[in-house]
Amino acid sequence: MVANEGSPAVAVVIPAREAADTIAATVSGARRIAGVDLVVVVDDGSVDSTSAVAQQAGATVVRHKRPLGRSSALATGAKVVAVREAGEGAEHVLLFLDSALGYSAENARVLTETVLSGDAALALANPPGARAAAASAATSRLLRTITGATFTDPLSRVRCTTRAAWEVSLPHGGDALADARWLAHAFSAGHHVAELDCEFATTPSAPRGFLALIGLHLGLLRWRLQHALDSRSRG
């Protein structure tokens, strides 16, 4: 489906690695969202058939020769959309999805509707009953200190954004806190942020695994120290 004439369309960016089992259904679900006229899958160095399956499902596919991480994949996808916009004179909002969502990716339409209506510049998916994981809770506490706002799941990997709200935090870092820093920068720059319930087949939120959790908490510590130093220098 495409957007009404004169209104922004929706470009979907899906970072994927070793996602051959789920990517076709995720692309299919994404294409059912009203306003979507472009689905870009960024294969982040997969050794399986992710690229071929995504292309067969109707996505535009670009591939990293080796794994560069989710943040790099998002940036690559956003650049592909920008090139398309320059060539066609189109305007898009960006919808970032997790490759494991399957057909339930269609439920992210509440995010695109919110951004397209102008009710928010950045809309985050908040799965109903989102886990109160230590990583998400700790990140939320730090963001409350930095921004004064409370977010339920600042690590959400499913989000829709205007181009302006995306670019305010470029270049995005490559660690597990990149999404949280983007959120903080967008909010601090005056972009309205909304968290909306979305029912997905899986809960796409970072981090996963013990080492990833350790890395995230170390990142939180560095971020907290840097914020304290910045606050002291401003004072």
Image (cartoon, rainbow, N blue to C red):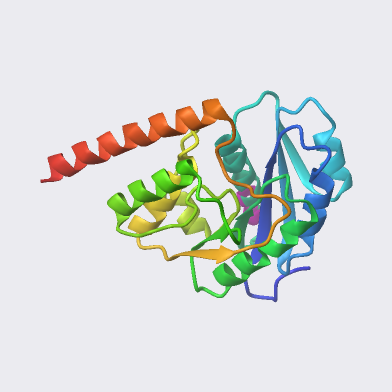
**Quadrant assignment, res 21:** top right
| Residue 16 vs residue 215, the one in the foreground | 215
Left of 43 or right of it: where is 155?
Answer: left
Toward the viewer: 101 or 56?
A: 101
Q: Which residues are magenta?
A: 82-86
**Where is residue 196 drawn, in percent x and y?**
55, 65
Which of 100 and 36 lies nearest the eye of the viewer?
100
Q: Magenta span has 204? A: no
How many marks do you count on the picture? 0
The residue under the point 64% across, 63% down is 198
Look at 21% across and 39% down and name the residue there: 228
Q: Is residue 169 visible?
A: no
Instruction: State left or right for residue 149 relative to residue 170.
Output: left
Residue 108 lies left or right of residue 117; in this view the side is: right
Image point (89%, 45%), residue name:
56
Q: Among all residues in the image, which is located at the extreme left?
A: 235
What percent of the width, then of the height, locates residue 124? 54, 58
Of 224 and 129, nearer the camera is 129
Q: What type of secondary structure mainly makes up the magenta span?
A: helix
Q: Is residue 85 magenta?
A: yes
Above or below: residue 233 compared with residue 95? above
Looking at the rendered image, the quarter that the N terminus falls into is: bottom right
Judge whether residue 148 can be spotted in this image: yes
State the image coordinates of residue 164 (x, y, percent, origin top left): 47, 58
Counting from the top left corner in percent of width and height, residue 12 is at 68, 54
